[in-house]
Structure formats: structure tokens, C-alpha cells
Amino acid sequence: MEREVLKINPHARKVLHVLSLIGTFMMVFGFLYLVQKYTIGLLFRLNKVTLYGFPIHMIIYTCTSLIFMKKFIKLSSPYKDDD
């Protein structure tokens, strides 16, 4: 299968690379967000705190997920150009 990946049109390969990165990002981000929501949020009741009717936990979980991903996770794709 690796040989097939190497023979793809360069434009299609770039599109597949971007789609792969986006999908990986969404899966990792969603997993981290849900882990925080159902552990920290339920333990400390952050899911019920609101600021002017807006749930504050969305901002907290989004920021911490992005910081964690930036520091500890390297996203990659099998379609990345080696140039």
C-alpha cells in the first residue's frame, strides 16, 4: 500500500495530506475535550458554570485541549511530501 501512496498525483496527494491532518486533529481534539468534560467537568461541576448565559467550560476545555496538543502531540500524515 505504501507504493500506491507514492504514485498519487501531487495535487491529490496534497489534498489527501490536508484532509488527513484535519481528521486527525478533529479526532484528537474531540477526545481530549470529552475526557475533560466527563472527568474534570463532572468532578468540579464546571459544566454548570455560566457567564452571561454562555457555558464557561467550553472556553476552558478548548484552550486546555489546544495547549495540550501544541505541547505534546505531533500530527502527521502518510501523504506528507518528503521534499
Image (tube, helix red, strand yellow):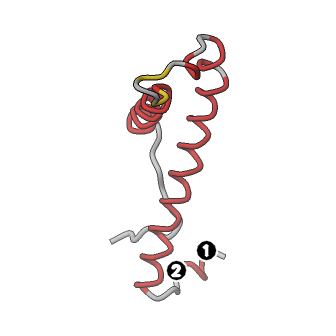
Tell me if residue 1 comes above or below residue 57 in the rendering: below
Return the x and y of residue 47 as percentages of the image width and height: 58, 23
Return the x and y of residue 14 as percentages of the image width and height: 42, 76
Graded by Cα atoms within 10 Å as few (under 14), some (14 to 19) or many (20 or more), the crowding at tag 1 reads few
Instruction: Give 30 or 47, whichever is nearer the viewer.
Output: 47
What is the three-letter code of the residue carrying label 1? Glu
Question: As drawn, which residue projects farthest toward the top?
Answer: 44
Q: What residue did someone put label 2 on?
A: 6
Tell me if residue 33 comes above or below residue 5 in the rendering: above
Tell me if residue 21 comes above or below residue 45 in the rendering: below
- Residue at horizontal 55 percent and vertical 18 percent from the top: 46
- Residue at horizontal 48 percent and vertical 60 percent from the top: 21
Q: What residue did someone put label 1 on?
A: 2
Instruction: Give 39 or 23, whichever is nearer the viewer.
Output: 39
Return the x and y of residue 27 as percentages of the image width and height: 59, 49
Q: What is the secondary structure assignment of the residue under circle 1?
A: helix
Tell me if residue 50 comes above or below residue 27 in the rendering: above
In the rendered image, which quarter contains the C terminus?
bottom left
Q: CA distance from mark 1 to mark 2?
A: 7 Å
What is the three-letter code of the residue carrying label 2? Leu
Q: Is the C-beta separation of discs 1 and 2 under 8 Å?
A: yes
In the rendered image, which quarter contains the N terminus?
bottom right
